[in-house]
Image (spheres, grey):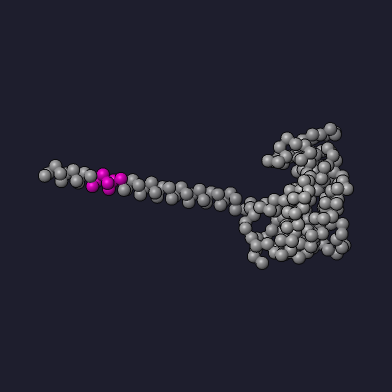
Amino acid sequence: MLFNIQDDEESGLAISDLMTALMALFLLGTLLALEKRDFISQHIGNSQVNTPHKYSKVENVLFSHLYDLAKQDSSLQWDEERNILTTWFKFESAKATLSIEAKNTLNSICPKLIEMVRREKNKIYNIVIRGHTDTSWSGKGNAFVGNMRVSYERAMNTMDHCLQSLGKNETAVATKFVAQGFSFSQANNEITQGKGDLQRRVEILFNYKHNSD
């Protein structure tokens, strides 16, 4: 009888110890999860991550238009998740001149884009037009610097053509547009990898204040 009592006591202690160990592991896991969450928040809190938001009617018109254009025109890709329109205007290597086809495409896009900025300028940080190049270079001087100039000219020519219909006093609209050149620093992505004709491109990025209507 004595042995049975001792066995029960030892069994009780073992279960108690096991429960204590499990509780300690649970608390440790909780602390690690909280630490990981704080780490992620600290490092992406200031990044331009598109959070879900309600589109205005003007935005819906533009984005629907971009989506339809991209389905019809293989030189366009509309990424609604990141609010980026990628345009392949068949730029010649080391050239920034817009072709007739490119201008026709912009003539379809830009009026709706300008209308959106006019109507929604209080909720738009900016519209960034970003030029890119491939990695080749046959000119003088540093290849990256030379391509930087070309990529910036591609962005500027795109923006210039897009805004040529603006009135002289529409500064509030014009200042929402920004032109940037990236040379070949972002030449490759999941689509353009190793393809020079696709690396030579322009992207239009929509940066929003994510407020409700």
Identity of the residue drawn at 82% across and 59% down = 111
Query: Where is 148 relative to 60, above or below?
Result: above
In magenta, the rendered stretch is 12-18
Quadrant including the N terminus: top left
Identity of the residue drawn at 58% across and 49% down = 43
Q: Main secondary structure of the magenta part?
A: helix
State the image quarter where residue 62 is shown. Answer: bottom right
The percent coordinates of residue 197 (x first, y second) are: 79, 38
State the image quarter where residue 186 is shown. Answer: top right
Q: How many marks?
A: 0
The percent coordinates of residue 14 (x first, y second) are: 26, 44
- Magenta stretch containing residue 14, yes or no? yes
Residue reaching furthest to the left: 1
Residue reaching furthest to the bottom: 213
Quadrant including the C terminus: bottom right
Query: Where is 39 relative to 62, above or below?
Result: above
Choose between 188 and 176: the one closer to the eye.
188
**Is 10 on the left-hand or right-hand side of 98?**
left
The percent coordinates of residue 190 (x first, y second) are: 68, 41
Choose between 192 and 152: the one closer to the eye.
192
- Magenta stretch containing residue 64, yes or no? no
Query: Where is 48 relative to 136, above or below?
Result: below
Choose between 106 and 139: the one closer to the eye.
106
On the question of residue 87 being in view, the answer is no
